[in-house]
Amino acid sequence: MSDVKDDALKIVNYAIRKSLPDEAVRAYLERNPLPTGRVILIAIGKAAWNMAKAAKDVLGKRVAFGIVITKYEHSRGSIDGIEIYEAGHPVPDQRTLTATERVLQITKDLRSHDTVLFLVSGGGSSLFEKPKGLTVNQLQEITEKLLKCGANIVEINTVRKHLSLVKGGRFAQHVYPARVVSLLLSDVLGDRPDSIASGPAYPDSTTCSEAFNILKRYGIEIDENIKSALSEETPKRLRNVETHVVGSVKIACEKAAEVAGQLGYNAIVLTTSLNCEAKEAGKFLASLVREEVFYNRPIRKPCAIIMGGETTVHVIGTGKGGRNQELALSASIGIRGLANVVVASVGTDGTDGPTDAAGGIVDGRTYDILKDMNIDVEETLKNNDSYSALRLCDGLVITGPTGTNVNDLILALIK
């Protein structure tokens, strides 16, 4: 299967390269000059450094000052005139709060002729935060509960927005009367601006009632101070913002299909809004692979079935892994024994859960290779320990931080 695996990795890497934010930010700014006056550059998220560097290259001395807040080990060096902070993700930490406070400090006395160039990418919800009446420990606790309960990203961010003094449009309120031009690299299905990084500079469409219902739905108990914070509504109108989505999983999937065709595969983008349990997505993709192997449909072989989106994991075990690794390992059960097939699932940001892997890649032999090592795949999945299993069978995809973040790319190749 080595040639099929090589093709899968080529497709994944090409799609990621074509989803990098640098060119998107540069192209937007060259086509759309910012208003005259000072520019204050604020970049948050896992792709914040890359976006900020591209913007600074275009705008040069027009940038009066700026701040980047990104994930640990995601900075690539200094940027002239820009302060750079690294902080916790997916759970905020004290560095998150310190960096956010610095942003609020330097933007507190802006005027109407000032423009905040707000560069936003996935991970911003964790990296940009000032909680309402919560300690950092309380914030971490409820964040971990939300991440582990199986809630999707829109649900998680609905709660986060109502616990924050910067999310859900409140950052735009803070910098008023300055203008805010937001360029978004979307990691949210449907590219909802109010949910990308929890929408710090976008009118919020969610309500306090929805936040309470989400917590109730997933059985998350909260303290009185959290109840109090959740009871204050977010702004529904903002007069000083304009918003542009410059990158998304849709583009990544289209680029994956493009290079798959060049490699000789008939390509189909099945969906760009996959949103379900990772293990269930793996089962579903394996069923499509079997349909191709046995009946040569829904598209003729050799073929590439491509999906984009963001699955969820309900963590009940004590193992190590991420949603992409769990999806791939789950698929290995359904494709067991099939020749010339590969399934890969990769986070475009290069990180999957609290691991150094971007995702996982499996074939028809993976299940039995692990079985020969006395690894029970089903039990491994129950323990949420996909990383440990995939590491043993050369099933991890490790890219390092990519500089982008547009959800996950899921791929099945069948020859």
Image (cartoon, helix red, strand yellow):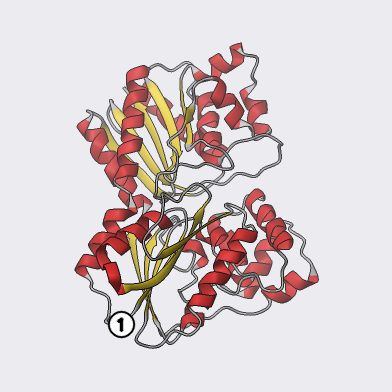
Q: Residue at x 28, y 36 (%)?
A: 267
Q: Quadrant of residue 32?
A: bottom left
Amino acid type at mark 1:
Gly
Quarter placement of the N terminus: top left
**Residue sitting nearer the eye, 72 or 180:** 72
In this picture, is 225 found above or below 138?
below
Where disc 1 sits, the SS reads loop
Q: Residue at x 37, y 24 (%)?
A: 5
In percent of width and height, residue 128 lies at 54, 64
Q: Residues within 10 Å of mark 1 (few under 14, many from 20)?
A: some
Q: Is residue 248 left or right of residue 223?
A: left
In percent of width and height, residue 4 lies at 34, 22
The residue to which callout 1 is attached is 37
Q: Is residue 38 left or right of residue 193?
A: left
In percent of width and height, residue 174 lies at 51, 81
Q: Is residue 14 left or right of residue 278?
A: left
Residue 235 seen in the current view: yes
Residue 294 seen in the current view: no
Quarter placement of the C terminus: top left
**Residue sitting nearer the eye, 306 or 141:** 141
> Which residue lies most toward the top here?
372
Q: Quadrant of residue 21?
A: bottom left
